[in-house]
């Protein structure tokens, strides 16, 4: 096989690609004569050889010679040196899980964006010569000390997620930052000096999720914020919670909520209007924080994407004022009325599984809906959904629906995979109908079964299941979760085992009473 750059050039042009980046070489696409293939690359601006077959990495990378290449991705390649590369105008470099000779980066003073992950970096001196750097990603690097970063005051974008950072005070000097990702930087210990970040008034994106923080009020200073993630922020924990979190136990969250009731009330986010100065927010994630009151969100009228799943919310009347909402996740709460959602005419995606819903008639007014998940509720009638002609994904498993015939309206017209699907376009999804209380097996209309250019869009897995007691279902899931973690339990220290066992006894004592009364 002879690979020729001229032939490749003609091939790409025949596709009439509008993108200026003409080449994206992936593993297994070209396996022969890499040297010949990459001899002439003058027309390239973006080169991605990540995950290239390892035996060719050492041959390909050093021979790269181009004045036009501005972006290079050599992630997962076995590269020992990039010193011999002649890429004078390189601006974006990605080195995920590869390479250790970072001092060689001094040869590329025009670098603006640098990504290095999973390399356990402790010395940042190699960054001193990169004066043009504005975007830095150092995720999953086991970094504990970031004091050296305070001198890089020109940084606009920094990602330090999944590290072991305790003190974030050095970041207070990076006042030009518009993007800061601190997701899970120290899950086991409290993140210190987060209040010092108040000087970062230019932030438009801030992620402090999955951390142990004592103060999140600092976000009130970020008036330009458009995207905020506070998911899984645990501000006050008792011994019970620490045991679950550190040891990774996956006990059904419904069942531990009552045990953590006091802790929920102590959560600093609860009832504090930290959003009054954040009226430009477009995306907000407040999932997994035991939030029960969302009334303070009323003024966030620009919100387009809101995630408040896995909380203890009962009342969502505030959401009626957020009329720009396009994607909403209220799953795993205590919501029984979604009436306020009728005002969200722009809503396209609604995730409301694991609540107390028995009526979804309001959904029929949301004609732009493409994705709905109302599984694990108490829904009996689904006729309001018949008007949703734009549905692409529909999940209604584990409800009490007795008759799905009304849904034939949605499936009567054959669903054809559009040609754009093969190029990354939209595709139809399966309807999830399994585990409902139907009296007889549901027979999908013929139009919904595979034929030429059609796909099956009904999933009737376990369709013969009848209504079962909710508590018994929860017990079954919880036992399965506990069984999955037996090995972890046995590896715990004796005192931890005792503490955990006591909590489980309390938990299932309460549960058993609710189940069999």
Image (tube, helix red, strand yellow):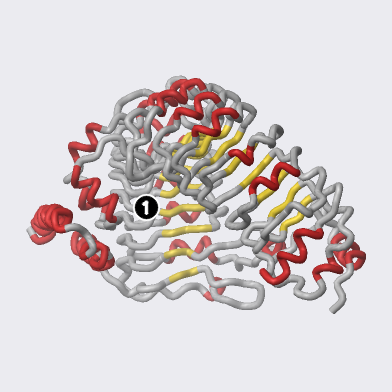
Q: Residue at x 30, y 56 (%)?
A: 248
Say which quadrant the N terminus sits in: bottom right
Q: Total label count? A: 1
- Packing grade of label 1 (10 A; few <14, some 14-19, many >=20) is many
Measured as percent of width and height from the top left, residue 434 is found at 38, 68
Q: Visible in this render: residue 341?
A: no
Q: Residue 25 lies in what quarter of the image?
A: bottom right
Query: Is disc 1 placed on a helix, strand or loop?
Result: loop
Measured as percent of width and height from the top left, residue 249 is found at 27, 57
For disc 1, the marked residue is 353
Measured as percent of width and height from the top left, residue 62 is found at 77, 59
| Left or right placement of residue 93 versus residue 390 in this view | right
Say which quadrant the C terminus sits in: bottom left
Q: Residue 78 lies in what quarter of the image?
A: bottom right
Measured as percent of width and height from the top left, residue 460 is found at 42, 72
Q: Nearer the viewer, residue 38 or 515?
A: 38
Q: Visible in this render: residue 249?
A: yes
Q: Residue at x 63, y 38 (%)?
A: 127
Q: Nearer the viewer, residue 283 or 485?
A: 485
Q: Is residue 195 above or below residue 120?
A: above
| Left or right placement of residue 378 versus residue 76 in this view | left
Q: Residue at x 70, y 56 (%)?
A: 81
Q: Nearer the viewer, residue 287 or 427?
A: 287
Q: Residue at x 87, y 62 (%)?
A: 39
């Amino acid at each position: 096989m002879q690979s020729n750059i001229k032939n490749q050039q003609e091939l790409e042009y025949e596709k009439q690609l509008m993108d200026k980046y003409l080449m994206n070489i992936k593993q297994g696409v070209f396996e022969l004569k890499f040297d010949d293939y990459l001899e002439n690359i003058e027309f390239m601006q973006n080169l991605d050889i990540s995950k290239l077959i390892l035996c060719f990495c050492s041959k390909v990378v050093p021979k790269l010679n181009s004045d036009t290449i501005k972006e290079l991705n050599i992630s997962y390649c076995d590269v020992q040196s990039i010193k011999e590369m002649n890429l004078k105008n390189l601006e974006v470099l990605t080195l995920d899980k590869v390479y250790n000779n970072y001092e060689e980066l001094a040869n590329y003073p025009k670098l603006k964006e640098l990504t290095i992950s999973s390399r356990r970096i402790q010395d940042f001196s190699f960054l001193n010569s990169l004066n043009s750097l504005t975007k830095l990603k150092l995720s999953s690097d086991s970094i504990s000390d970031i004091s050296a970063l305070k001198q890089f005051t020109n940084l606009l974008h920094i990602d330090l997620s999944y590290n072991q950072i305790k003190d974030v005070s050095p970041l207070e000097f990076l006042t030009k930052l518009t993007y800061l990702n601190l997701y899970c930087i120290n899950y086991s210990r409290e993140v210190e000096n987060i209040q010092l970040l108040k000087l970062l008034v230019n932030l438009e994106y801030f992620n402090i999720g999955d951390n142990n923080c004592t103060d999140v009020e600092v976000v009130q200073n970020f008036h330009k914020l458009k995207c905020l993630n506070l998911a899984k922020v645990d501000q006050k924990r008792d011994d019970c919670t620490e045991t679950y979190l550190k040891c990774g136990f996956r006990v059904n969250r419904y069942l531990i909520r009552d045990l953590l009731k006091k802790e929920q009330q102590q959560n600093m986010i609860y009832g504090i209007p930290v959003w009054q100065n954040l009226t430009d927010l477009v995306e907000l994630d407040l999932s997994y924080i035991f939030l029960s009151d969302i009334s303070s969100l009323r003024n966030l009228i620009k919100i387009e994407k809101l995630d408040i799943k896995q909380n203890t919310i009962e009342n969502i009347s505030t959401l009626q004022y957020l009329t720009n909402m396009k994607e909403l996740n209220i799953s795993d709460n205590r919501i029984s009325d979604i009436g306020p959602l009728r005002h969200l005419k722009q809503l396209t995606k609604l995730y409301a599984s694991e609540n107390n819903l028995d009526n979804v008639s309001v959904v029929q007014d949301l004609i732009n809906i493409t994705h709905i998940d109302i599984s694990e509720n108490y829904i009996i009638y689904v006729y309001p959904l018949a008007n949703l002609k734009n549905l692409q994904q529909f999940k209604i498993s584990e409800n009490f629906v007795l008759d799905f015939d009304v849904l034939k309206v949605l499936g009567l017209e054959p669903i054809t995979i559009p040609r754009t699907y093969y190029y990354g376009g939209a595709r139809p999804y399966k309807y999830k109908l399994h585990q409902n209380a139907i009296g007889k097996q549901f027979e999908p209309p013929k139009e919904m079964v595979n034929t030429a250019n059609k796909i099956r869009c009904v999933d009737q897995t376990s369709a013969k299941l009848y209504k079962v007691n909710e508590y018994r279902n929860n017990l079954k899931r919880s036992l399965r979760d506990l069984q999955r973690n037996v090995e972890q339990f046995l590896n715990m220290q004796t005192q931890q085992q005792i503490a955990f066992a006591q909590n489980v006894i309390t938990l299932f004592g309460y549960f058993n009473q609710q189940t069999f009364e």
